[in-house]
Image (cartoon, rainbow, N blue to C red):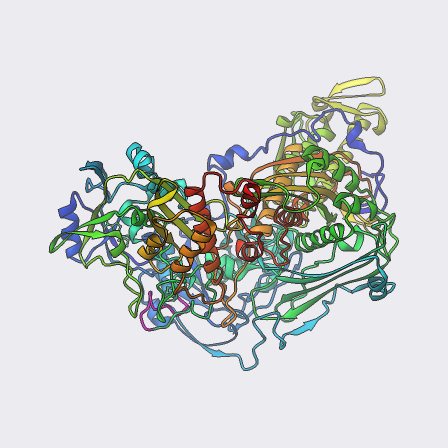
């Protein structure tokens, strides 16, 4: 680790001043410190934003405003979140471990970096870590990598869970920066790699995430299904966030987002359009999967994700729409 | 004092002394005495010693697979804050030593043999300075002109029969296969495994004149002393190792590893103590791996389900010249019958970190495959898999004809089946669905060779009626402190509070060390023998025959006399050193611990995720010394079985040979949520051929076959037979039955 200084910002403005002066924000530190140990991040100046007071959950019209420093544990335990946006609580609880969730924050979670092994190994080529060096995962061990939204430069996933739920819930990221406040739909927060994988998201230099806004609850059936190699404490191989309502035996409304499938939390309105107004059936789910995966491309070890996504989607839709989906 | 037996264990000690003593400590599920220290953080693990003036070393790993170091650009790094030295000494080791090597492994780190091999150590005032400098150090390499392949399956890989593993051949297997009523010929593969001990490898080296003191995390101190001395070209008696607490080893700390030599060399060079702690990634990349295996199993059975032919051939890998070859067929040699047989292990020479002992070398992966293949045979015959196993237990070891010292396999299968509810298992797959999950059940035998190794221990009976047990035996979290105290307390008739156990210091008599499940029976036997010698003296002092002597709660009685033990000792402590060495019993008998595993799994009908819902294991391993520590060993073993079955896999990038998943985030060991209720049944047994304690090894038994039971349960659940471990969902999903089929069928 490189030597660094650490200051505590007393409020958002204090934090912005520090960021403006070149400091890096540290929240829970559960991702940043690991990156610093390996010198993938090597800031010489850290500003802790844990005492900025941005750790409140408050009503926002019919919606909810979750401060950037609300811990994942607190967010998932909040009565309003659990009642009206259970998808979010489920997604958070499906991630990491209780110790990490006690520490990890809403803003930090959105900004967590990929788990690509080549990114974390400084002996390896990686365009995200060291632009222009190539992509080690292409042609390497890429079992956990993306099949949607990839580019020749990078095939890494955004690995998190929380953002997938937020995407299905039409949440927005609230920021404050040198040029004032911004409201960024979650779907526009993360960046596909294109030819510049080094930038994971659309946050501008010196910009601070102040919170996340959830719109009014949909009242629909909400399911987060995370498929992973072990029962807990593993990143998703594929995850599905669904918020869906039925009317007269037909799908009346549906929002679907997918994690660890694409380079960013993935939402494709065409999939939803294929489902809305239809009577749920295995054939319909297959059709939706065809739409979702029309451009999917595997890179060897991760080919299975294309099959898995189809099956995970079917399982989720069956659970949400068929009264007794899979009883033998 | 003359004992009725020599050091060499040449004939079974059938006196079963521990059944005749009266203290009642043996077998009791006593807590580990050091437990409170460990859970309260008061036990000092190696890295935690605070030596004055201690500098910190961090290893620098090679970033090429093979070649030579052309130049190390030390100067810029030496100018960094706190940096004292950049060392690439000829004494430093390229490979870690194999268990019981007792001599230096391959040295001279200017040659690079595998990606991630240490090539230098950077020493600085603080760990972070040293790590920063280690990352910054530029090393130039010349790639090897004739590299060995990175892939064991490469046609260029040289394949050898290891020196110590002769093929076992009998009859005509090919003919038996041709003529058999039922024949199974299947290939399985298992991936490389990491030991993944909780405590990373660490050494603090301190020179006092020409004497070297190492505080470190090792499993076999008396061998490690010789290894480090050989590396440094000094006399073993100049080396002292202190390792009272070891945070797990699982084989990876059997032999001396890179950080120990680097710390010793660095401490000598800078004239200060040096601590070298490996990072988690370094442990994964450099220390020791279990080889991946490709195994072909052939089983030929007659119409009655009797095995007439058995083939088990394995391809494993290691670095060139390395003696160790994963002994995959070790238990196959004696487990089931079939006189037409061919058992053989071959080793491919490749460039990957040293392959060596990891968690039950041989049986862990050999049994899991054999037991999966047995399930395939049972299915082909249409016979209950337990019945198939019972029918095929030979009277003596096939080909060799050696008798079994003891074998509780049938009892284990029966006791386990009863506890598990095996009779409720559906014989054909895809019969039980609960919601989205297919439910299935599987069984496997457990078998692990029993080994005794030379061990010594000193027992001192003090005038105050307390006793002290001393040996350099390590306790790697398994319960050495507990059981050695129990044995001494039992033999000397003392309550457990009156017995103190000191371990893990090479100033003490050389115990067996922790490895191969032999620590308890070997060092325990040495303790027992020391106590026997003390008992002889006590009998004489009391004035009775040794056989008459009863020692209980600090009181000696016999021959009509009675006296407090303390009174017999008087002012001078009674100290005896007990010793045991393997002798004829090791050859005259086939010795192994046995058991049976039962697993219930759920396989997700859509996603193929497999979760183990419950497991039962029943085990017979001679005398149970401590029911709690033995149970914990069996439990832990079955947890490793879950890992081996479902998640663990070292993933190497075949382009440059680097290990991709070199941390615990992506090398998946089971976490709590993966480990369901596990029932452990301990079957009491006496095996006098195995040790004077009538006990056999238990440490590794719980792994040996466990993954097979899980694989068999997966097949029973969803009908898919995957012959490539770990059984991750990607290997299942496209073979699973249509997840909607049952519902559709019901509606229709
Ligand atoms: C072993 C392990 C397992 C994990 N498993 C999962 C999992 O299964 N699912 C999952 O979703 N996640 C998982 N995580 C990731 C975890 O959720 C993230 O590490 C955590 O959410 C990051 O939050 P933090 O507050 O600690 O961020 P930090 O580490 O403090 O910061 C991360 C980044 O965000 C930036 N940042 C933080 N807050 C702000 C802000 N308000 N404005 C602007 N920038 C900011 C920082 O500058 C830094 O670049 C796992 C992590 C670990 C270590
Ligand atoms: S996938 Fe992306 S993060 Fe991974 S090596 Fe390639 S460029 Fe780097």
Q: In which quarter of the image is residue B156?
A: bottom right
Q: In the rendered view, would you say A153 is above or below A94?
A: below
Q: In the rendered view, would you say A194 is above or below A327?
A: below
Q: Which of A250 and A291 is in front in this view?
A: A250
State which quarter of the image contains the N terminus of chain B. Answer: top right
Which percent across, then down, holds residue B355? 61, 62
Q: Residue furthest left?
A: A179
Which residue occupies 63% across, 33% down? B628
Residue B724 makes an appearance in the image:
yes
Which residue occupies 32% across, 33% down? A83
Q: Residue furthest bottom?
A: B145
Magenta run includes residue B254: no
Range drawn in magenta: A122-132
Which residue occupies 78% across, 65% down? B166
Taking B342 as reference, is A187 left or right? left
Q: Is the magenta stretch mostly helix, strand or loop?
A: loop
Q: Looking at the image, in which quadrant does ligand 2 appear? A: bottom left
């Amino acid at each position: 680790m490189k030597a660094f200084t650490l200051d505590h910002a007393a409020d958002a403005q204090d934090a912005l001043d520090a960021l403006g002066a070149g400091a890096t924000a540290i929240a829970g530190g559960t991702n940043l410190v690991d990156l610093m140990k390996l010198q993938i991040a090597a800031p010489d100046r850290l500003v802790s934003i844990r005492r900025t007071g941005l750790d409140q959950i408050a009503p926002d019209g019919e919606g909810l405003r979750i401060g950037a420093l609300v811990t994942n544990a607190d967010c998932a335990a909040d009565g309003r979140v659990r009642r009206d946006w259970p998808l979010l609580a489920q997604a958070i609880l499906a991630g990491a471990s209780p110790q990490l969730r006690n520490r990890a924050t809403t803003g930090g979670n959105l900004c967590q970096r990929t788990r690509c092994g080549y990114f974390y190994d400084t002996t390896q080529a990686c365009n995200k870590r060291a632009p222009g060096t190539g992509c080690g995962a292409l042609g390497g061990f890429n079992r956990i990598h993306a099949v949607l939204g990839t580019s020749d430069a990078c095939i890494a996933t955004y690995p998190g869970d929380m953002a997938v739920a937020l995407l299905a819930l039409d949440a927005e990221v609230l920021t404050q920066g040198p040029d004032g406040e911004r409201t960024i739909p979650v779907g526009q927060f993360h960046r596909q790699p294109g030819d510049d994988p080094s930038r994971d998201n659309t946050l501008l230099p010196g910009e601070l995430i102040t919170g996340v806004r959830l719109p009014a609850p949909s009242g629909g059936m909400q399911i987060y299904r995370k498929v992973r190699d072990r029962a807990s404490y593993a990143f998703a191989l594929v995850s599905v966030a669904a918020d869906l309502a039925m009317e007269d035996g037909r799908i009346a409304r549906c929002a679907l987002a997918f994690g660890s499938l694409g380079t960013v939390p993935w939402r494709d309105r065409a999939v939803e359009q294929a489902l809305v107004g239809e009577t749920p059936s295995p054939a319909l789910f297959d059709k939706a999967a065809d739409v979702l995966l029309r451009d999917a491309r595997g890179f060897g070890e991760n080919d299975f994700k294309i099959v898995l996504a189809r099956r995970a989607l079917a399982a989720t839709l069956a659970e949400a729409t068929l009264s007794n989906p899979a009883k033998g | 004092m003359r004992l009725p037996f020599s050091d060499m264990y040449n004939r079974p000690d059938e006196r079963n002394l521990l059944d005749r003593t009266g203290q009642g400590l043996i077998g009791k599920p006593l807590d580990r005495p050091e437990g409170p220290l460990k859970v309260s953080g008061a036990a000092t693990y190696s890295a935690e010693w605070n030596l004055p003036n201690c500098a910190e070393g961090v290893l620098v790993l090679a970033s090429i697979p093979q070649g030579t170091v052309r130049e190390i650009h030390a100067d810029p790094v030496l100018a960094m804050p706190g940096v004292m030295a950049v060392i690439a000494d000829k004494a430093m080791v390229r490979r870690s030593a194999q268990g019981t090597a007792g001599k230096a492994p391959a040295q001279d780190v200017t040659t690079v043999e595998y990606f991630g091999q240490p090539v230098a150590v950077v020493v600085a005032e603080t760990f972070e300075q040293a790590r920063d400098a280690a990352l910054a150090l530029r090393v130039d390499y010349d790639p090897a002109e004739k590299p060995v392949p990175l892939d064991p399956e490469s046609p260029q890989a040289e394949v050898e029969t290891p020196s110590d593993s002769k093929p076992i051949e009998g009859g005509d297997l090919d003919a038996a296969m041709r003529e058999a009523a039922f024949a199974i010929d299947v290939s399985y593969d298992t991936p490389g495994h990491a030991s993944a001990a909780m405590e990373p490898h660490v050494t603090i080296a301190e020179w006092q004149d020409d004497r070297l003191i190492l505080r470190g995390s090792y499993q076999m101190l008396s061998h490690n002393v010789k290894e480090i001395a050989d590396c440094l070209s000094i006399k073993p008696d100049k080396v002292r190792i202190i390792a009272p607490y070891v945070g797990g080893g699982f084989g990876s700390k059997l032999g001396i590893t890179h950080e120990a030599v680097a710390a010793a060399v660095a401490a000598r060079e800078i004239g200060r103590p040096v601590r070298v702690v490996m990072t988690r990634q370094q442990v994964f990349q450099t220390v020791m791996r279990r080889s991946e295996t490709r195994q072909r199993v052939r089983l030929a059975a007659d119409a009655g389900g009797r095995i007439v032919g058995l083939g088990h051939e394995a391809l494993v890998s290691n670095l060139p010249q390395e003696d160790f070859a994963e002994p995959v067929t070790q238990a196959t040699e004696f487990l089931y019958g079939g006189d037409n047989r061919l058992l053989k292990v071959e080793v491919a020479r490749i460039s990957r970190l040293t392959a060596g002992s990891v968690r039950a070398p041989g049986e862990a992966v050999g049994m899991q495959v054999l037991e999966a293949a047995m399930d395939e045979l049972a299915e082909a015959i249409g016979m209950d898999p337990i019945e198939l196993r019972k029918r095929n237990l030979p009277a003596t070891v096939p080909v060799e004809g050696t008798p079994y010292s003891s074998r509780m396999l049938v009892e284990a299968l029966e006791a386990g089946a009863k506890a598990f509810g095996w009779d409720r298992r559906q014989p054909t797959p895809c019969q039980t669905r609960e919601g989205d999950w297919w439910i299935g059940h599987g069984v496997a035998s457990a078998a692990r060779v029993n080994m005794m190794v030379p061990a010594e221990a000193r027992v001192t009976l003090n005038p105050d009626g307390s006793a002290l047990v001393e040996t350099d035996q390590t306790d790697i979290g398994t319960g050495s402190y507990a059981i050695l105290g129990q044995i001494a307390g039992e033999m000397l008739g003392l309550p457990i509070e009156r017995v103190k156990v000191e371990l893990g210091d090479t100033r003490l008599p050389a115990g067996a060390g922790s490895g191969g499940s032999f620590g308890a029976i070997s060092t325990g036997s040495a303790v027992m023998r020391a106590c026997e010698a003390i008992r002889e003296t006590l009998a004489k002092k009391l004035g009775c025959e040794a056989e008459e002597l009863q020692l209980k709660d600090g009181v000696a009685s016999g021959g009509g006399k009675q006296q407090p033990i303390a009174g017999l000792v008087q002012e001078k402590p009674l100290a005896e050193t007990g010793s045991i060495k393997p002798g004829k019993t090791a050859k005259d008998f086939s010795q192994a611990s046995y058991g049976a595993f039962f697993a219930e799994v759920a396989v997700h009908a859509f996603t193929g995720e497999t979760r183990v819902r419950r497991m039962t294991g029943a085990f017979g391993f001679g005398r149970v010394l401590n029911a709690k520590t033995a149970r914990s060993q069996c439990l832990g073993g079955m947890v490793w079985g879950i890992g081996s079955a479902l998640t663990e896999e070292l993933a190497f990038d075949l382009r440059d040979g680097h290990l991709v998943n070199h941390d615990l985030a992506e090398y998946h060991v089971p976490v709590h949520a993966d480990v369901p209720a596990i029932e452990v049944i301990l079957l009491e047994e006496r095996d006098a051929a195995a040790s004077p304690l009538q006990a056999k090894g238990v440490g590794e038994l719980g792994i040996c076959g466990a993954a097979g039971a899980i694989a068999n349960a997966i097949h029973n659940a969803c009908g898919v037979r995957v012959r490539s471990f770990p059984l991750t969902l990607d290997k299942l999903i496209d073979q699973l039955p249509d997840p909607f089929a049952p519902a559709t069928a019901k509606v229709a």
